[in-house]
Amino acid sequence: MSDNSIFRRKSINNVLQQSEDSHGGGLVKILGVRDLTSFGIAAIIGAGIFSTIGRASFEGGPAVSLLFVFVSIACIFTALCYAQFASMVPVSGSAYTYAYVSFGEIFAWIIGWALILEYAVSNMVVAISWSEYFVGMLHGFGINFPDYLTIDYGTAHKAFLETQAGASKFTDSTLFAAKAYEHAPVLGSVKLLIDLPAGVITMLVTSLVYVGMKESRSASNFLVVLKLVVILMVISVGAFYVKPENWSPFAPNGAQGVLGGVASVFFAFIGFDSISTTAEECKNPQRDLPRAMIYCLVICAVLYVCITLVLTGMVNYTELKVDDPLAYVFQKINFDFMAGIISVSAVVAITSALLVYQMGQPRIWMAMSRDGLLWKRFSKIHPKFKTPSFATIVTGFVVAVPSLFLDMGFFVDLTSVGTFFAFILVCGGVLYLDYQGLSKDAKFKIPYLNGQFIVGPLLLVAISFVIYNNTFFSELEAKPLLAVFWLVWGILSVLAYQHKFSILPVLGILTNLYLMTELGVTNWTIFLIWLAIGLVIYFMYGYKNSKLAK
């Protein structure tokens, strides 16, 4: 491939050599499989289980537990592909680096640029969730933080207008937001409302990440143990208050209601991607990264399903549209002591998710900068702390500033498109490497199950089923992206027959692609705008300064 091509690829040997050349005195190898598993659990069990699980349950009812199963299965297919790549290319950069090796520079740039958005947005959700639990904790101790310093302008203004209209009764959260708007100081004609705790915790965590991996590891391990103790306590205690009648109807809004929570649910699971960003700080990445990815996904999937069933069993799903569902359900049954423990623990535990995401994003920037696609300063390693210092500082501001002014619902809607795209390319990348014969040296390989006579027949069965139920054309009309899903499945059927593709990466592509079709217009609009900005930067800077171009 010509060096002037946007599809120029890096060889695996080139990636490994560049990593050694760039970091002779750089990142420190101190992480083992326990640390990596801890990072994965820290990222996956964060705002998802302490906050957005309530919104998803409100939309889909108790059946959202099945959505967690479906999403975790999709993630396991993807994690196996990540694990194989990690054993072949044990360097920082995650899916960005994997795409560079398999599909070329332009796809690597798109993935890297998308992951920048995904990590930043996910951390904004986590920061806002932390703020809500923190304010609730202070209130429990009799400390009332000024309400206009705990909420964004948009949410408060909307709630104020609703209460002024006086249509019906309002939730406690709506009344709180409206009151905050009323009490907010005015600058000129503008009400001053910001979520100050969200911004402050982001900068404090960024400072910890800046200081070093060893300190971050110790903090993460401690916080994860605390988090797991609280969640197991919630499950074991809450099980005694479950009323089976709350599980009926199990799927009150049907499959569409369940799948409508994809954005809320899936954003929680992208945390396992962050494990691969620490590859260059692992003692034995080829062995430990694959193990850690599988361990953390299995553990987290079980916990999410159990928590969902307990929450929707303790109270009716219609009451769960709150940002602190775990504490709320125990308040609802007048178990205030347990609610207080959860609120205090959530403040500490959600911090660990913030820590891992803030640690992952600078390392993706570092990898892109090292390849010449971003400015050199992003790959600068601090001489004392051995961290990507400049990238870490920028990450802090990129996350902290928006979290001061925007609401959680807005961010949740933006968290998934780029991640699904990254996951699909990683699964496709494994198929490409297998086809090229480059996977033979992988220290971890996905179990090979020949899909030659499986992928095509499964397609025929699936199409026959939806046609038999008279939903094929109606679903295509409602979700035009399904046409892409069926087309890709058809292409994979032909390729699987020709090249005897392994079925597991194919299932990873198909499940992620199907979940993409469930995302709303907002997700796609913002992602395409972000992508357009990224392509402008690439062609103005990255294309010309790429190390491969030289």
Image: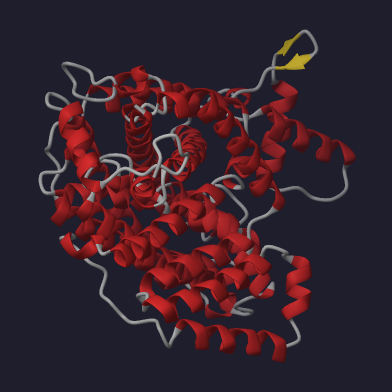
Quadrant of res 164 = top right
Q: Residue furthest top?
A: 188
34 lies left or right of 531 = left
Q: Where is residue 351? Give x, y as percent.
A: 36, 37
Can you say whether 415 is above or below 433 in the image? above
Front residue of 375/214: it is: 375
Q: Residue at x 33, y 61 (%)?
A: 81
Give the colour scheme shown.
secondary structure
327 lies left or right of 195 = left
Can you say whether 191 is above or below 289 in the image? above
Quadrant of res 505 = bottom left
Q: Residue at x 23, y 40 (%)?
A: 14
Q: Where is residue 329? Give x, y as percent.
A: 52, 58
Q: Where is residue 455? Give x, y as percent.
A: 47, 81
Q: Where is residue 434? Give x, y as percent.
A: 30, 66
Quadrant of res 407 = top right
Front residue of 19/518: it is: 19
Can you say whether 80 is above or below 547 in the image? below
Front residue of 156/147: it is: 156
Q: Is residue 176 in view from this perspective? A: yes
Q: Residue at x 71, y 39 (%)?
A: 175
Front residue of 148/507: it is: 507
Q: Residue at x 61, y 30 (%)?
A: 151
Q: Quadrant of the N terminus?
A: top left
Q: Residue furthest front?
A: 2
Q: Is residue 130 in view from this perspective? A: no
Q: Quadrant of the C terminus?
A: top left
